[in-house]
Image (cartoon, grey):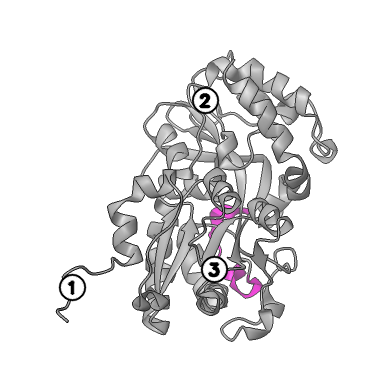
Amino acid sequence: MAKSNITNPSRRSVLVGAAGAAIAAPWIWPRRAAAAQQLLVRTPGGSFDDYKRKAVYEPFQQETGIEIVPVAATSAKLLAMFKSGHVELDLIDTGDGILLELEKSNYLMPIPYEKFSYTDPGDLDPVIKREYQVGSFIYAMALAYNTEKFPKGSEPRSWADFWDPKNFPGPRTLPAMASGTPALEQALIADGVPRDKLYPLDIERAFASLSRIRSSIPKFWDTGALSTQLLSNNEVVMGSLWSTRVQVAADQGAPLAIQWNENSLLVQAYGIPKDSRNAEAAVKFIDYASSPEVQSRWLATYKAIPVNQKSYSAMAPELLDPDANVPWTRSKGFVLDIGWWSDNRPKVNDYWSDWIIQ
């Protein structure tokens, strides 16, 4: 029998050739035998992958022969993919709140810490070491601003200032529902709610507060790449952004800075789908990426707080409060309650859907 000239495309070629369609349509991609050496990983995309490719993905492939194929997707699209039953991912790299939702829906397998060889599980921060997910780094949702628009001494210092366009003029940006968590906490703090009294969130009060600033928000962001693009391109003068994204843009020359006061502590984490076809490789990657050496190499450049406590010495000095000698997330922040969000995200989504079209 003559050999056919038609070959099955690899997962990489399908993703590259139909990236836009793949995100919008059901996520079904052909596989071939060689794909066993590829690990399909959901990521936030953008500069996140640029930094991680050099510091983690490529060294991991050299070490193990396993190629990391990042697939960028918003939190909303990730959740929709699981609900539709069309999942081709081997590993998920996303916020811990989204992983908690997937865990509660029985979509994740337990993390087998006993199989780790690169990392001693005892070195991991207990806060991020959970049964169905493990943190990859700690960061924050913080107030970012343009330093040319607000020189030192005139910058916004709180969410109340952010909500004050009269004294701090200019367009702003806030996270959209598709980002995972819209700015309800920030809205309530701006409305006078103390950080230690936020939860349970008063949803109606939060949206009423958001309405007061709505006219100053020309665009809500749903990806980290878009958030920093808006600020770097001077489309907005300040915003509620992920601290890691701001640091990357600032390091690349953008006139941006972070006001750490009233920041909310966030965790980026790994989870493995129950039907992952490359679960063993996924575990190996988590193990490798959590090791002190890799955490130090990666997070010294990406500027986030390590989860491996043996890597603290490599942390960027910008992340430390010089007065307290602890990360800003501890001295000036509060922990985002992912349990509350997991229980109430559908309700918030209903409010958001009505509010955003007004």
Residue identified by numbered label 1: 4
Image quadrant where one finds the N terminus:
bottom left
* Disc 1 secondary structure class: loop
In the picture, the disc for residue 172 is: 2
Residue identified by numbered label 3: 314
Q: Mark 2 to mark 1: distance in Å?
A: 57 Å
Residue 112 lies in the magenta stretch:
no
Specify the quadrant of the image occupied by residue 118: bottom right
Observer able to see residue 269: yes
Observer able to see residue 186: no
Above or below — where is 46 with respect to 113? above
Specify the quadrant of the image occupied by residue 196: top right
Q: What residue sits 68% from the left and 49% below the top?
A: 265
Span highlighted in magenta in the image: 308-320
Is 292 or 257 nearer to us in this picture? 292
Residue 5 picture location, percent across and down: 16, 70
* Disc 2 secondary structure class: strand
Image quadrant where one finds the C terminus:
top right
Answer with left or right where residue 171 lies relative to residue 187.
left
Nearer to us of marks 2 and 3 is 2
Q: How many badges with numbers are in the image?
A: 3
Q: What residue sits 55% from the left and 75% below the top?
A: 279
